[in-house]
Image (cartoon, rainbow, N blue to C red):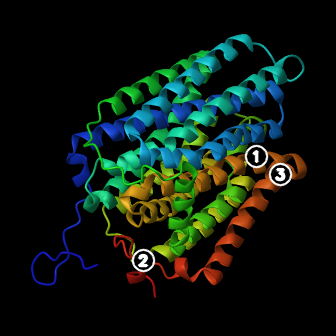
Amino acid sequence: MTATMIGPGLPPPHRPYEAFSLPSFRRYLAGLLFITLAWGVQAVVVGWQVYELTGDEYALGLVGLCEFIPSFLVTPIAGNLADRKCRRKLALIGAMGLLAASLALVAVAFMSRGSGPNDDGPMHARWIYGILIVAGLFRGLTTPARSALGSEVVPREMLATAISLRTSTWQIGAVLGPALGGLAYKFGGASTSYLVDAGLIIAAAFAFALIRITPRTITVAADEPFFAGITEGWRCLKERKEIIAALTLDLVAVLFGGAVALLPVFAKDILHAGPGTLGLLRSAPSLGAVAVALVITHLPPFERAGRAMIIAVVGFGVATIGFALSKDVWLSGLFLAMTGACDYVSVVVRHTLVQVRTPPHMLGRVTALNALFIGSSNELGAYESGLAARLMGTIPSVVFGGCMTILSAVVAFFTCPPLRNLKRLRDADPHQNTD
């Protein structure tokens, strides 16, 4: 594929905000921002509340497991639905389910006031686990549709800039959401924080409802068996080895290197701070990501995207080790910001590969598999963190995870030529971008 030239020998000008001119895309970004804020609020409040109720690092790992299992079960089915049904309607169904879960958390917060590890705390924590399982079902059901919807409302030639804007919007929400959750918990308690969470979900649903899309042609054959469509999505993904390599590297790195699940332990027992500080620490990775996003958005695409991703994963591991060894709140925040900055590079490479190199009629199913990899790394990684902290201790477990992250990047460099040799991401034909 040859880029259109403007003038003799000149590439087309880079317009980082051109997709923002589309009203439906702006509404999509608003919905994405509100839903990300809601998740950030909920993550901080659930983490702090569960640790106060149980006093157990492993209980924080169970939070990730309760989010992972339902998402893992329904996401492949959800991807097939996203290619057969209206993606906007599926996004709205998911928002309503998440709203119901948030209101249920409000009720549990009222019932668990004053509880702790030595009385009814563990029982109330189990109620929270059950609600998170239900929320995970709705999140898994609609994530592929919501992600594919973002590509449906922009022309294909604007996808690269649209993905950058989407990722930046998500990161802004991921910065502000945990900070908002920490402040809401500090000044209003868990029940007030969950009400804020519910209000943000309502705002997201309203924004998604205002999106106007042209009905697309459903290219999935009417007589094709439903589960055969899932298999077709996996077959499409396997043909794109550079995507598989990027997804696998991200899965292994974040599975071992994620320290976010243990932040309540670091905030309360190691840094001797409260829920407000926890919210700020949870925001720090996304703050670093936003800083890098502002730079990347105004630069041309990576010339050697594969190597940029591998280097970023190494940086993620180094920063994770630094965070584990820090005893100062500000230094810990700095290392967390560095993890977010490095992770953003990986996110841009991975998401752009999936969106640009997947046929539009397969986007829901391939996006679902992408979400499955992401969920495995983030949520199953949270369980791994809680289990490792119980077996090894909090600080040693995070240091071990950072070392494993670095090792995974080194192994990927020497064993994955499709990723190591990956160059520019704009072209749909992967063979034009590898050595």
Whichever of callouts 1 and 2 sits on the residue coming sooner in the sequence is 1
Cα separation, mark 3 vs mark 2, equals: 39 Å
Q: What amino acid is labelled 1 in the image?
A: Tyr
Residue situated in front as seen by the camera: 184 or 211:
211
Image spot of residue 103 (x, y percent): 58, 18
Q: Amino acid at mark 3?
A: Ala
In the image, 71 versus 116, the foreground residue is 71
The residue pinned by badge 3 equals: 388
Q: CA distance from mark 1 to mark 2?
A: 35 Å
Which of the labelled discs sits on residue 383, or is there none? 1
Tally the numbered discs: 3
- What residue is disc 2 on? 430
Above or below residue 346? Residue 2 is below
Measuring 73% from the left and 11% from the top, which residue is drawn there? 111
272 relative to 56 in the view: left or right: left
Residue extending furthest toward the front? 223
Q: CA distance from mark 1 to mark 3?
A: 8 Å
Q: Is residue 121 left or right of residue 88?
A: right
Question: Splitting the image into 4 quarters, where does residue 311 fall?
Answer: bottom right
